Amino acid sequence: MAARIADAPILPRDEAFAITLDFQSDPTPEKVSLGAGVYRDENSEPWILPSIKMAKSVVERSLDLNNHEYLPIAGFDPFLKVARELVLGNYNTSNSHVLSIQTISGTGANHLGALFLAQQLRPRNVFISDPTWGNHFLIWQTAAPHVIQEKYPYYDAQTRALNFEGMTSMLENAATEGDVVILHACAHNPTGIDPTRDQWRSLAQVFKRKKLFPFFDSAYQGFATGDPEEDAWAVRHFHEVLFEDGPGNTPQGMCIAQSFAKNMGLYGERVGAFHLVLPQDTPSTGPYSQLLRLVRAEISNPPLYGCRLVYTVLSNPTIRAVWYEDLRKMAGRIKGVRSMLKQEIEKHENVGDWTHLTSQIGMFSFTGLSKDQVQRLRDKHHIYLMSNGRVSLSGANEGNVKCIADAIAEVVQEHGT
Ligand SMILES: Cc1ncc(COP(=O)(O)O)c(C=O)c1O
């Protein structure tokens, strides 16, 4: 007998979206949103990137805007080519080849990758950093329910730094050949802490030796340092190391989920790509046909408008140069906010050391504030952030940073660090 739809259990609201709704319905004029992972300018307003404005006018003039035809299942090929090059650089094509599929932003790429790997690689485990972007768990739960989710240590709350020892020893001891490991390509969400280059180098060797399958989630390329080349370093290094020995001696591959939501401010346009890198001697026709089948069943083919904008930004040298400026501006403003907030908090007594604010990178900071302190910030000061203490720094600016700092200092003094 069929189940009763009315019996569907009630699930809790998604925290990230719930915070935004709660913030919007708070009538207090001084309220501050440090919840949503979206960039805001110095007036707390959404910022349309100048490069995107230019791309829009080019698209309107030169591409056929009256073309509303379907794209192929895999997406807009010129977009896929520039997107692939953005993340992998001028990659060496002699040892590997890359299959690229356009997706519904980074979430769609994560989802397609999980579905595909669950069916074609069939790993025993997927290793996910502790903590991580909450959707990783949900995506793997729904797309790959038979794959066991394991958390690998990432953040050390005592030192407020990367627990590199814990991370590597877990991968060394608990992961087995063919297991998938999700890695944040840069600007780790929520901690804002990335491995150093030496640590990435040593991780790549572990992956290679143990034949683990790296799944890079690249949602912030260009946002961490302001330089998309720099932010792609880890992905490119893994690509080089994993495939350098040629056929026979390599893991089965690696993959990348790429988002253009943050680095182009195209949140609602849902532009992304999934790239599957395979050793040169692995036939691609089978894997590619399986990817197409999954896309066909899920979305049939991807949307057209956003990918034309991204293609225009990346393929037009003048607009691309403006985009590099835009990235520097966004990353630079966030960096400035980090320093101001640290300085303002530390003007107070008995608040401890806030150096972690300036040593972390990207849009987020993992403040170390407790759930109770977060609740107090919301109830008393109308400042909204995630219950794990993550703040999205783009909500702060010269106008409100002192109020935020004073409120944080107050809750820290009340509850202790
Ligand atoms: C780590 C990480 N991966 C992926 C995404 C996907 O974002 P989108 O689906 O908007 O591209 C996000 C967004 O917050 C993220 O933080």
Image (tube, rainbow, N blue to C red):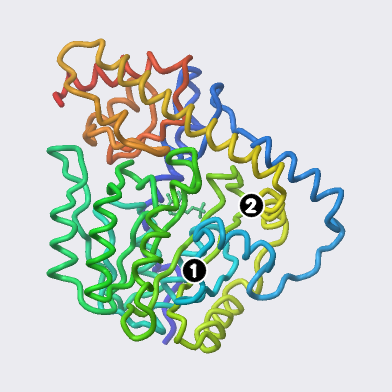
Q: Toward the viewer: 175 or 18?
A: 175
Where residue 336 sits: x, y (%)? 43, 23
Q: Is residue 80 above or below residue 32?
A: below
Under tag 1, what secondary structure?
loop
Q: Where the C terminus falls, by quadrant?
A: top left
Q: Toward the viewer: 303 or 231?
A: 231
Mark 1 lies within 8 Å of ligand 1 (Cβ measured): no
The residue at 50%/39% (across/down) is 38
Residue at numbered disc 2: 269
Q: Toward the viewer: 255 or 367?
A: 255
Q: Toward the viewer: 315 or 260?
A: 315
Under tag 2, what secondary structure?
helix
The residue at 50%/23% (across/down) is 27
Q: Which of disc 2 and disc 1 is earlier in sequence?
A: 1
Q: Is residue 36 above or below residue 414?
A: below
Tell me the amino acid under the disc marked 1: Asn
